[in-house]
Structure formats: structure tokens, C-alpha cells
């Protein structure tokens, strides 16, 4: 389960899409960039391969809720 999820605009001029995010998963901090097309670029260590797909899905849902469904 993702905890302490945070995000902010990647660019100071917020009309340009792109966001940085961070969260904790299994007591480890992860961070990355969420691109407008929904791709995720990890800026921290990569999650375990067996967890990555689930984490990407959860991040996508959180971003849809926080950014697009305002």
C-alpha cells in the first residue's frame, strides 16, 4: 500500500503538464515524474519488478483523482 503520497507541478508555469511525485511503499521512499501521457519515470531506485505494475496502477489512479478530477 502506498502511503504519504505527494505530488507537485513539474514546471513553475503550471499550465505545462508534468508532475513530480513521491511516496512510501514497504518502508522505502520512491519518487518519480508523472508525464502527461501517463508514463512514469522513476527518479529514485526502482521498485521490485513484482511490485512495479501494481504501484504504477495506484499512482495513475491517484494522479487521475488529484490532478484531472479537480
Image (cartoon, helix red, strand yellow):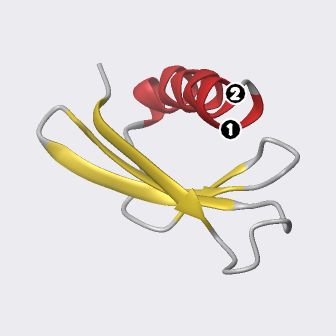
Placement of the N terminus among the 4 image quadrants: top left
Q: What residue occupies the far left of the structure in this picture?
A: 27
Q: Image point 34% across, 52% down: which residue?
A: 30
Q: Please, is residue 70 above or below residue 12 in the view?
A: above
Q: Position of residue 45 (x, y in %)?
A: 36, 61
Mark 1 = which residue?
67
* Discs 2, 1 touching: Cβ within 8 Å: yes
- On screen, residue 4 versus residue 41, left or right, reads left
Q: How many marks?
A: 2
Q: Image point 62% across, 21% down: which residue?
A: 61
| Image disc number at residue 1 | none
Separation (CA) of disc 2 from disc 1: 6 Å
Residue 59 sits in quarter:
top right
- On screen, residue 61 versus residue 26, left or right, reads right
Placement of the C terminus among the 4 image quadrants: top right
Q: What residue occupies the far bottom of the structure in this picture?
A: 12
Q: Please, is residue 49 above or below residue 17 in the view?
A: above
Q: Secondary structure at mark 2?
A: helix
Mark 2 = which residue?
64
Residue 60 sits in quarter:
top right
Amino acid at each position: 500500500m502506498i502511503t504519504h503520497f505527494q505530488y507537485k507541478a513539474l514546471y513553475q508555469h503550471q499550465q505545462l503538464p508534468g508532475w513530480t511525485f513521491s511516496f512510501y511503499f514497504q518502508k522505502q521512499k520512491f519518487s518519480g515524474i508523472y508525464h502527461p501521457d501517463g508514463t512514469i519515470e522513476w527518479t529514485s531506485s526502482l521498485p521490485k519488478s513484482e511490485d512495479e505494475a501494481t504501484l504504477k496502477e495506484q499512482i495513475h489512479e491517484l494522479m487521475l483523482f488529484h490532478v484531472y478530477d479537480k
